[in-house]
Amino acid sequence: MAGPRFSFDRFVLDAADRRLTRDGAPVELNARYLDALALLVAEAGRLVSKDRFMAEVWRGVPVTDEALTQCIRTLRRQLGDEAARPRFIETAPKHGYRFIAPVSRVGEAEAVEARAPGAVSRALALRIGLAGAAGGAMAGVFGGTLYNVAGRSPAMGAISVLLVLVCLTMAVGVAGGAGVGFGVAAGALASGRLGPWTIAGGALGGWLAGALGKLVALDAVALLFGRSPGEITGAMEGALLGAAVGVGVWLGGRGAGPPSPLRAALAAGLASLAAGAAIPPLGGRLMAGSLDLLAQAFPDSRLRLGQMGGIFGEPDFGPTTRAVVTGLEALLFGACLAAAITWARRR
């Protein structure tokens, strides 16, 4: 006779099959600990006393309280939970334990879907895309602030220039982040999970966002000022960074425990740094390089990013300056996006 199946967070507990899975992968638990988890989940939201554990899990076998403590400690470790900040198992001192995560009872078809590795719903895909836009905005705020410090002429008003640069870099960051975020979500939906396909999805989303952004930006500048500044950041740069973000999102969800925004940010940051290092040799440029091109195309501009070259012993925005700044830009963008997307996924 079929027993109940419970779904919570990224886990499915099949009481009849005596099986716990996380994103479709089995989670190792001995029989006694699995019984304890089944009892907690079946009574989700209600206190399970120590006496009840002894009666229904140990079935009258005399054991000490330490055996129950060790059982709960192991369950928390396998679920990626923490006693100090519980998401699954809450302690009621001297009384027992309570399962506090939302639990749903699923039918056969629903259980199969929930077992699919890294299953992604449309609602989660939407959150991932919006989180990408939010991460891009965050990167834009940081980047615009740094450009203001590095490239503002002394004759320029500090607050007004800061606002202009931050708004500009935020707009670019939101557009690029949304493109990559929804690309990652599309890759996850196409494959049914957040796996290697997120890399291809991120690359495609970044490519589309970069190509469209470049087209609109060049046409806008040409329309307003009568000439185009030349090769600003575009499809190639977007594809490289989108793939790097996909790598971070994928790796951030691997391993034991819930998805880690920090692990995702580190992985995406390193992958983006490598992508950023490849961009200048391929003839590409990111935001700082594009702003420098605009400043050169319009001599009356008071933006002077070329003065950043002095840090690296160059008279202007030379190859060394461009390589270092491009790498740092890429690292910032990739880390912010991957952290935001993984945080949304975890939530």
Image (cartoon, helix red, strand yellow):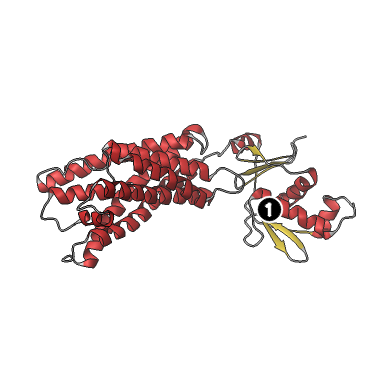
Q: Position of residue 270 (x, y in %)?
A: 44, 46
Pick out the residue farthest to the front.
313
Task: Reply above or below: 90 against 271.
Answer: below
Q: x and y percent of residue 39 in the render?
A: 76, 50
Res. 31 image quadrant: top right
Apparent side of residue 11 relative to residue 316 in the rendered image (left or right): right
Number of other residues with Cα within 10 Å of mark 1, as a class: few under 14, some 14 to 19, many 20 or more: many
Tell me: 264 left or right of 209. right
Which one is nearer the viewer's eye here, 29 or 155?
Answer: 155
Give the residue type that dot 1 points to.
Arg
Q: Nearer the viewer, residue 29 or 90?
A: 29
Q: Nearer the viewer, residue 96 or 144?
A: 144
State the residue at coordinates (31%, 54%): 170
Q: Residue furthest top?
A: 191
Along the horizontal axis of the image, is 255 left or right of 200? right
* Residue at image mark 1: 76
Q: Secondary structure at mark 1?
A: helix
At which x and y percent is residue 46? 71, 58
Q: Quadrant of the N terminus?
A: top right
Image quadrant assignment for residue 167: bottom left
